[in-house]
Image (cartoon, rainbow, N blue to C red):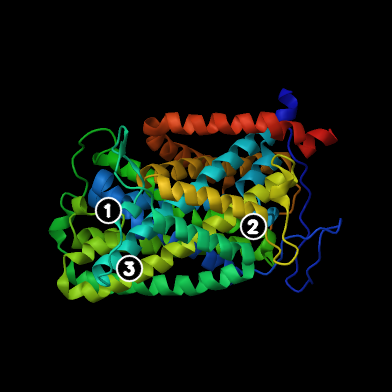
Amino acid sequence: MLKSLFRVKPLEPAGHVDAGEPFEGSLDGEATLKRTLTAKHLTMLGVGAVIGAGIFVLTGQAAANHAGPAIMLSFVLAGFACALAGLCYAEFAALMPVSGSAYSYSYATLGEFVAWFIGWCLVLEYLFASSTVAVGWSGYLVSFLTTTLNLPFPMQLTQAPIDWNGTDFVSTGSLFNLPAILIVAAISGLCYVGITQSAFVNAIVVAIKVTVICLFVGFGLQYIDPANWTPFIPPNEGPGKFGFEGVTRAAAIVFFAYIGFDAVSTAAGEAKNPQRDMPIGILGSLAICTVIYIVVCAVLTGMTHYSLLGTAKPVATALEAYPKLSWLKMWVEIGAIAGLSSVILVMLMAQPRIFYSMSKDGLMPKLFGKVHPRFRTPYIGTIIVGVLAAILAGLMPLNVLGELVSMGTLLAFATVCIGVLVLRYTRPELPRPFRVPAAIIICPVGALACLYLFWQPFVEHWPIFVGWTVFGLLIYFSYGYRHSKLRQKA
């Protein structure tokens, strides 16, 4: 049994997908995913996922509760770990242009059991990420309706019925977060219709939110008070609360903001020329977004004292203190609503494609592998993921969701870093259109950086994460292990 758990999936060199090739179905006549995405689409997908929650939602909470103005250093630490992991993702995405992301990479290098574990972590990543961002989206929408348009909205329908106070779950007195549920439902419908339509809408939304961010930075620079940056690293007040320990804890939280480039790799099965375009999309979006994050953090904490930013809408909160910028607050809210919509879109596109790959390997029920005959999308998986994400968005608090997402993401990234090095030694003959430079150094350092950041929230949320893992193992041994196509061929 132990041998079968760690049996790797045979990996053959991927045929080069020419952008000019006509689309064809699978050999057995089933509909397959449609290759329509270019390097530009992939980069925009990455920017669409990365620029959103990190700026409009999590930045303020991480600064207020953990890092203070040093949130800029937190983004540098998270960006460093992401850059190392991004190089490894780029090599795998060019070598294996499939839709399974870290799950597929782990299956080809570390074995079925590890692949399942990482696939289950990706569920934690994408499913919970879409719910987390939907909660932030709701905060900006309600602010826009109530303070900008003066339209009343029932407070009982604006947040989850429970909240996390750092040690326990407490009641909020609310019923559920209705706007969060509605946005998940709407975007799930868009993902159901097709990848081309989704990518087109995403490109429009990315243009809107990048314009708004430029406006915020440009006008916000005039209102920076350097006194708000002092002390740059507030004195430690307890485990993970300020000091350098708080900076690393915040880095683990804002790591959530970088998962967009990971989502790019899940679209490899729909890229026209994945060997060339995937590295461009992954590394290009990562570089663009890191610079934007650091600049916005500097302006945000310079305009408003970090202790006031612990809201679901920190950018709008910062602008509320400056009446002359009330017009900009409205546009920031519009940009945030649009920007967070694109993040939800990319997350809800990614998760069904992970299930699609797992289903094709027999580790998930066949219904997740079904492709719509007309829209060429994994439509049943899209419906199921949409329903689950809507439930989580309506009932779970933002802070717990965000940290759980980061934990799943960091484990997946660490595994990809290790997998690149393993495959270099086990299959050195495979052609690699993109190679990680100095892999013997970058891969181990990338894995260690991700595991170090993983440990920060794990100390506090280990019962939830362990419970999630045990639940996943029950599914694997009750279904996946028995239906594994790789094990059946052995």
**What residue sits right under mark 3 in the picture?**
333
**In this rendering, would 427 be left or right of 342?**
right
Name the N-terminal-most of marks 2 and 3: 3
Q: Is residue 197 visible?
A: yes
Mark 1 and mark 3: span between their CA atoms? Answer: 14 Å
Question: Which residue occupies the foreground of this view, 431 or 155?
Answer: 155
| x and y percentages locating residue 24 in the rendered image | 81, 66
Q: Of helix, strand and loop, which one carries label 2?
A: loop
**In this rendering, would 282 be left or right of 24?**
left
| x and y percentages locating residue 414 in the rendered image | 53, 41
Q: Of helix, strand and loop, which one carries label 3?
A: helix
Sort mark 3 into few (<14), some (14-19) or many (20+) by Cα contacts within 10 Å.
Answer: many
If the image is split into quadrants, where does the N terminus sit?
A: top right
Name the N-terminal-most of marks 1 and 3: 1
Sort mark 1 into few (<14), some (14-19) or many (20+) by Cα contacts within 10 Å.
Answer: some
x 60%, y 56%: residue = 265
x 71%, y 48%: residue = 367
Look at the picture and state if 431 lies above or below 276.
Answer: above
**What residue sits right under mark 1 in the picture?**
311
x 38%, y 49%: residue = 176
Question: Which residue occupies the foreground of this view, 371 or 485?
Answer: 371
**In this rendering, would 315 be left or right of 2?**
left
Q: Give the mark toward the camera: 2 or 1.
A: 1
| x and y percentages locating residue 121 in the rendered image | 55, 40
- The three-letter code of the residue at mark 2 reads Phe
| x and y percentages locating residue 412 in the rendered image | 55, 43
Q: Give the mark toward the camera: 2 or 3.
A: 3
**What residue sits right under mark 2 in the picture?**
434
